[in-house]
Amino acid sequence: MKRLLFIELQKIWLNKASRVLTLTYFILLSFIALIASIKFDIGIFKLHLAEMGIFNFPFIWHFNTYVAAWLKFFLAIVIVSMMANEYSYGTLKQNLIDGMSKKEFILSKFLTVLLFAFCSTIFVFVMTILLGLSFSSYTEMGIIFSDLEYLLAFFVKLIGFFSFCLFLGILVKRSAFALGFLLVWNIVEGIAKGILVFKIFPDSKTADSITQFFPLESMSNLIVEPFTRLSVIKSIGTQIGVENSKDYGVHFSAIIIVLIWSLLFLFFSYKLLKNRDL
């Protein structure tokens, strides 16, 4: 397994575009810390994001994982390009000629997916600890390490999304078309959800029960937006008479759904490669 992973990492590092995108991703992750410096001072309206409590434990786990998850598209480009380059440069056929089986080839790609997800999670963990200890009003050990389930959800979300990108890279063979397919799939899911919510089941939660099984929607459900959890937002909502009954928790069922999709994408990737004439 180490040999397979080393081969993939070497391919990525030797490709300038993939190397730049990977480094850019981790650099942008560290820029979350700059949010603490954002200040708005317009007359009587003053806003300092750090003072709103976004870096307080345990809320910071929710906030950082949600924001960091948006940056996953940089690594998605790397993963899709990784597969496209295999076809463009003929390295896939060469690997198979050199004795690598198709199962080992898919495994090497999935190991890369796991490594990206793991490194991203560790990076976010370290950054969150540093930011929290610097800005949080609560630094008791019990509070610091509560809500760590958001890190697990972040890790699973990346695995699911990167596995989907891997599948699209094998299915379409061209990175631009694969990313375009990803965008189209996202739009299709959005339209389907809109029809279910506003047309077919407007007055029930049946639509949510159905859409939770959509691939991208299931990944989105792992970490819901954290902003309406902030006390200042809740206060504004109370003043204007808006009730907030949103569930912000990480649910085991959502994790299972995404893991099942990840396994399915891995299986479909293997079946495509196995049945395709290279």
Image (cartoon, grey):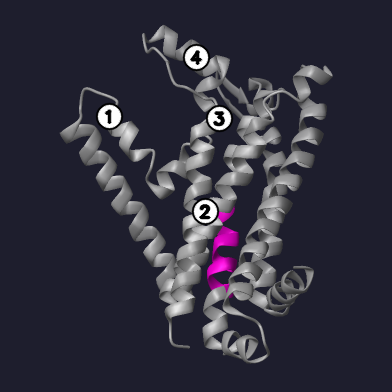
Question: For mark 1, what is the residue?
Answer: 206
Q: Amino acid at mark 2?
A: Ser
Label 4 packing within 10 angstroms: few (<14), some (14-19), many (20+) = some
Question: For mark 4, what is the residue?
Answer: 234
SS for dot 2: helix
Residue 71 seen in this snapshot: no
Q: Whole-Å distance between the Cαs marked 3 and 2? A: 18 Å
Label 3 packing within 10 angstroms: few (<14), some (14-19), many (20+) = many
Q: Whole-Å distance between the Cαs marked 3 and 4? A: 20 Å
Residue segment shown in magenta: 71-82
Identify which residue, 12 or 206, lies in the foreground: 206
Q: Nearer the viewer, mark 3 or mark 4?
A: 3
Q: Whole-Å distance between the Cαs marked 1 and 4? A: 27 Å
- Image spot of residue 216 (x, y percent): 43, 48
Q: Amino acid at mark 3?
A: Val
The answer to whether 155 is drawn above or below residue 241 in the figure is below
Q: Whole-Å distance between the Cαs marked 4 and 2? A: 36 Å
